[in-house]
Image (cartoon, grey):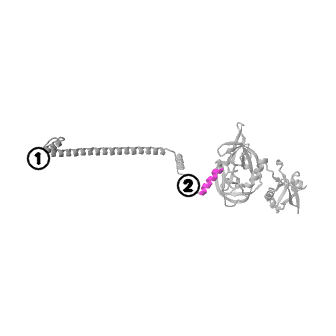
Amino acid sequence: MAGAASSSSSSLISTGFLLCHFPQFPKKKATTLALSSKSHNNKIFLHNHKQLKLAINTTTTTTKLLRDSFLVVCTSVALSFSLLIADVDSSALAFVITTTTPRKLQSDELATVRLFQENTPSVVYITNLAVRQDAFTLDVLEVPQGSGSGFVWDKDGHVVTNYHVIRGASDLKVTLADQSTYDAKVVGFDQDKDVAVLRVDAPRDKLRPIPVGVSADLLVGQKVFAIGNPFGLDHTLTTGVISGLRREISSAATGRPIQDVIQTDAAINPGNSGGPLLDSSGSLIGINTAIYSPSGASSGVGFSIPVDTVSGIVDQLVRFGKVTRPILGIKFAPDQSVEQLGVSGVLVLDAPTNGPAGKAGLQPTKRDAYGRLILGDIITSVNGKKVTNGSDLYRILDQCKVGEQVTVEVLRGDHKEKIPVILEPKADES
């Protein structure tokens, strides 16, 4: 009994220990309380889950609202920018397009563009001013009477052009590539070869001398480039090929022939005169001087004085201010007149006694006491080189020097004679 009691007492103590933490309920009620506690915990979990889900949904909704707002702002900015661009004028838009998407050029086009950019600073614009008197006020005015092109020869300010560009000028203006304008002085000119040299007092850093090439080895068919100011349009580039060599034209001032002229189909128009003719390397090979055209505009036949001829003339003009060219000191008949006589050569019309030919004894054409025409000497050769017309005579004299003695063969009457003549410079050049 005692053991049973002890066991029962121990069970009670144990039960009482357990009941110290939980209220003493009947067993069935304890089970119901446990189930109720579980149900309550589940409800709390479901409530918390719903709150979490609601929070997640709220965050998602907020994110969507922010994203939509951002898209609206971006769309508004893009629309405003497009409206701003739409107001830009066409020239600015073209400029933007040009800078952002550079045009792709072929290699030959790039070479031409580079040649133009490198040589344009050497080309100048020349304005010929003449003095005119106003018919009503009698005021003396300077008015432009012509314009042309030229190019910088050296850093000392020497500019080369055609003589017919500056002929008759009372004042000259030279405009450089940067549009700065300077007064120009005439250093010298050669009317026979249509070449003139000017000088401007411009800063040396503004002067870009043109690279000088050679014309002796030119070939028909090679590319050439002409830069000038046709019709007053500054710095215009035209291209073509050499279509002929060793042509001959007459000087616009004196009628004296210019030999070994370059013929090109590059467009040369009024205003191009005096501008450079360049080869594909950008070197000077000639001065654009004349065109063959019934209308006065380019017809595809232009002429340039070769640089080998120009270089010698420019050197003399820069050093001495003149070109010392030998002469025979005669006046001769037109070639057509000699042809009508049925002879070949140069007919001497006049040989002043103070000139080289007169001193040597050449006979001029004259009339006798009855008024009959007595023909003078007919020059048939000089230094053994045949002379058939005036151009041949000039060509031979261009190869001679002042003070040189030449042998002139003439037809006098019905026989030939050889007469030594010492060449002299022109009277106004002595």
Asked whether 103 or 261 is in front, the reply is 103
Asked whether 140 or 80 is in front, the reply is 80
State the image coordinates of residue 327 (x, y, percent, origin top left): 83, 53
Q: Amino acid at mark 2?
A: Lys
Would you say residue 110 sits in the magenta stretch?
yes
Q: How many marks?
A: 2
Q: In the image, which disc is placed on residue 342?
A: none
Asked whether 378 or 98 is in front, the reply is 98
The outermost residue toward the right is 369
State the image coordinates of residue 395 (x, y, percent, origin top left): 79, 57
Asked whether 148 or 335 is in front, the reply is 148
The outermost residue toward the front is 2
Mark 2 vs mark 1, foreground winner is 1
Mark 2 secondary-structure assignment? loop
Q: In the image, which disc is placed on residue 104?
A: 2
State the image coordinates of residue 200 (x, y, percent, origin top left): 71, 43
Quadrant of the image occupied by residue 180: top right
Q: Is residue 28 left or right of residue 141?
A: left
Determine the CA span between mark 2 and mark 1: 115 Å
Would you say residue 429 sits in the magenta stretch?
no
Mark 1 secondary-structure assignment? helix
* Of pointers 2 and 1, the one earlier in the residue sequence: 1
Within 10 Å of the Cα at label 2, are there few (<14), some (14-19), or many (20+) other Cα atoms?
few
Residue tagged by mark 1?
3
Quadrant of the image occupied by residue 33: top left
Question: Which residue appears at 62% of the width and 54% of the height?
Answer: 112
Span colored in magenta:
107-119
Q: Is residue 408 left or right of residue 301?
A: right
